[in-house]
Amino acid sequence: VALVTTHAPLRDVPGLIRRRKIVEVVELTRDFCRRLGVRRPRIAVTGLNPHAGEGGLLGTEEKRIIAPAIRQVGAIGPCSADTVFYRARHGEFDAVVAMYHDQGLAPFKLLAFDNGVNITLGLPFIRTSPDHGTAPDIAGRGMARPDGMIAAINLAARLAFPRL
């Protein structure tokens, strides 16, 4: 899962959706999938509005901004966010680009809360971290699980040494 916007109030998200940003995120996602060995990544892009706007009935961002970006990069969509993650989970897509934080991360964390990994794409170095964050609320209480950190380290090693 990759995000077009990150930590922004939901009311601000429509104004942050830009064609060039969608193109950039899809291209970074495609490159990352290839680094993982996916030769021809199938990347789905969500719409912003429910049911990907239903042809303009529920918003126009899909027609005006999202669909042209998708055509430019050869991705798939705009897909309805309420079904695209199910479709990806069942092998139809290799990655999903979501428009905003909770649209993409709520389904991701449902599936991989304990061992999900955050990767910052587009940097000249590898940067991974446990997706659940630092969890300061449970620090020192004997409740933390190491799964996320182990997964982050393993992925960083896999990216650094792809032929091992």
Image: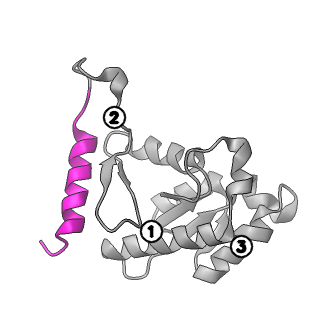
**Which residue matches tag 1?**
94
Q: Is residue 126 magenta?
A: no
Q: Amino acid at mark 1?
A: Asp
Q: Residue at x 35, y 30 (%)?
A: 135
Marks 1/2: CA–CA distance:
28 Å
Badge 1 element:
loop
Quarter containing the C terminus:
bottom left
Magenta-drawn segment: 144-164
Residues at discs 1 and 2 in contact (Cβ within 8 Å): no
Please give left or right for residue 93 compared with residue 153 in the image.
Answer: right
Q: Residue at x 24, y 43 (%)?
A: 149
The extreme right residue here reads 57
**Which residue matches tag 2?**
134
Residues at discs 3 and 1 in contact (Cβ within 8 Å): no
Badge 3, how many Cα within 10 Å: few under 14, some, many 20+? many
Q: Amino acid at mark 3?
A: Ala
Q: Is residue 155 magenta?
A: yes
Q: Amino acid at mark 2?
A: Thr
- Nearest the viewer among 120 and 57 is 120
The main secondary structure of the magenta stretch is helix
